[in-house]
Amino acid sequence: MTKLIPISIEGKKWIQLSQLSLDQARSLKSYLPFVSLKKIFFQGIELSDCLDFDTYEYWFKSQQIPSQAEAMLDF
């Protein structure tokens, strides 16, 4: 799984769920409380599916752990 690069808006890092694959977006949405997604206005554009990058990064790392454990079992 490829990790997204955050966008920086007013000194805070964000990702957009729409940048993820459908499976990843579904998995992340099921992991989060609904109130985690924010609408952010950036250069006159409304970004409606934004998530704090730290939250995304925590989720991303938690998704990597099962994959790493499976790789260790392959030996």
Image (spheres, helix red, strand yellow):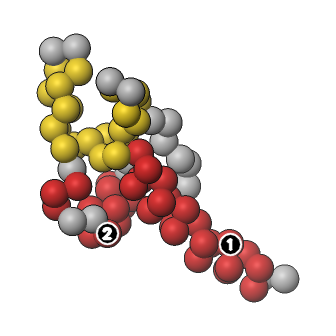
Q: Which mark is residue 31?
A: 2
Instruction: Tell which of 26 and 62 is nearer to you.
Output: 62
Q: Is residue 62 visible?
A: yes
Q: Quadrant of residue 30?
A: bottom left
The residue under the point 59% across, 76% down is 66
Q: Residue furthest right?
A: 75
- Quadrant location of the C terminus in the rendered image: bottom right
Label whose residue precedes the other's in the sequence (1 or 2):
2
Is residue 18 visible to the viewer in this orientation of the structure?
no
Going by the image, does 45 lie left or right of 54?
A: left
**Numbered circle sitting on residue 68:** 1
Residue shown at 75% from the left, 85% from the top:
73
* Residue beneath the point at 55% across and 55% down: 1
Res 70 → quadrant = bottom right
Q: Residues within 10 Å of mark 1 (few under 14, many from 20)?
A: few
Residue 53: horizontal and vertical position, in percent?
A: 41, 45
The amino acid beneath tag 2 is: Tyr
Q: Amino acid at mark 1?
A: Gln
**Considering only vertical position in the picture, is 36 above or below 44?**
below
Count of all numbered marks drawn on residues in the image: 2
